[in-house]
Image (tube, helix red, strand yellow):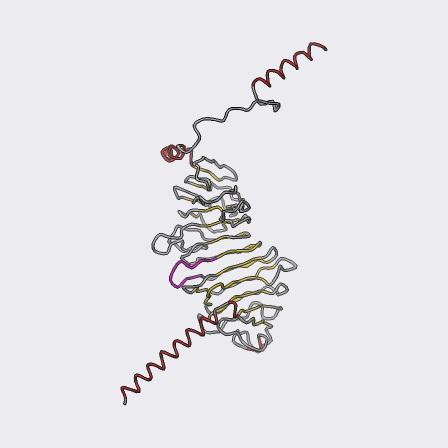
Amino acid sequence: MKAENSRRGAVRNHWSAALLALVTMLAADPALAVDRIWNGGGVDDFWGTADNWDGVAPIGGDRRVFAGGNKLTTNSNNLPTGTAFAGIRFDATAGAFTLSGNLLRSGAGTSVDFSANPASAITQTIQHDFLITSSGSLTFTTQPNGTITGNGAINDATGDQVVNMNGTGTLNLNGTRNFSGQARLNGGTIQAKVIANAGVSSSLGLGDDGAGSNPIIRIGNAAATVALVYTGVSAASTNRQVQVGIGTAVTDIGGATIANNVADPAHTLTFSNAAFSAANTTAIAPRTLTLSGTNTGQNTITGAIVDNAADGSEELYDQYEWTNLAAKPEHAAQKAELAKHLPTSNVPTLKGKGGDSEADEAKAARKAKRQAGKK
């Protein structure tokens, strides 16, 4: 009898665990999310107090919507560490919040965004750490007047979880993040305080899932040109590649801007990979890579900058103290290899009324001489 009861207890425990897993999965589905709206009317500052919300405290899978101006910086997430959430949304009319407290767990399609574009410039700050589940992703979406600053860590459960950075405003990423999936800079301006080699924590994640995958920093998406701005407190170098844009349509012209705006000229930015850019060989629309910034030090791209079409054309940049090292002798062999793909002869000059041919130039000279003789 004791053995039978033990078996029945095990069955009940497994059934309870299965139910818990099912509830957790359902709660993390954004389509089933319930918005819980913050009003800060409770007797304390905690997220777990119903009176701080619209009468019901959020549970796993709900979206937290922050509105009004109560307890902007004193609010604290005291919900169980790792509670799942469908999203964090800042109402367009809300004051400037600073969110802090226990770690938050994101599921599939979890987002941090604004309800609309605020009427005037405002920055919303998140101190929380995030954990992205094995089937999850995390997307930040800014607005022209709506800046989001993330100061916490972003970790993933099993590697390869993606962080999307969308919108038309500014996303400030301070500190380091340990997610292993690709960093996709899809819109707006992303200001990164830490940029490092693949496998090293940075504002743009590890860029390494342990198998050497996901080192690419993708900047630009469809028709949107996106800016990556370095704002660190020391010189930085990365061996991660950059891919300019994504998409194969003729309208997918979104390019990339890379800037260093650090005041100290010693705090330079270097891209050290022998192949700076990872070509999108299926792209057919032209895209532009712009190097800029206010830093006056020698910011460097060591490797080759190649077109998405991978035609091997050589491009040199020396603007705003950005330096391409293609002229250095140690890169001669690589340049020779790339030059194999360049045309071996020029297209003949077309003759016509455009004045571009030698015959047209001679004719114009004779006409000018005749006119001069008549004077």
Identify the residue at horizontal 62%, vertical 57% (top origin).
121
* Closer-to-camera residue (346/338): 346
- Residue 30 in picture, x, y percent from top left: 51, 67
User: Where's the C terminus, which quadrant?
Assistant: top right
Q: Residue furthest right?
A: 375
Residue 129's x, y, as percent?
46, 64
Looking at the rendered structure, the number of numbered marks drawn on it comes to 0
Q: Is residue 271 left or right of residue 41?
A: left
Identify the residue at image location x=49%, y=36%.
Answer: 318
Give how far across and how far down residue 354 sits, in percent.
61, 24
| Residue 82 coordinates in the image, percent (x, y) | 44, 70
Q: Residue at x 59, y 15 (%)?
A: 362
Dominant secondary structure of the magenta stretch? loop
Residue 112 painted magenta: no
Residue sitting nearer the eye, 17 or 39 = 17
In the rendered structure, the answer to whether residue 193 lies left or right of residue 53 reads left
Evaluate whether residue 244 shows in this view: yes
| Relative to 183, residue 341 above or below | above
Residue segment shown in magenta: 153-163
With respect to residue 314, does 150 lie above or below? below
Is 154 covered by the magenta stretch? Answer: yes
Asked whether residue 263 is in view, the answer is no
Q: Is residue 31 left or right of residue 355?
A: left
Determine the residue located farthest toward the bottom in the rendered image.
Answer: 1
Does residue 267 sit above or below 372 in this rendering?
A: below
Q: Quadrant of the N terminus?
A: bottom left
Viewer-closest of 131 and 349 = 349
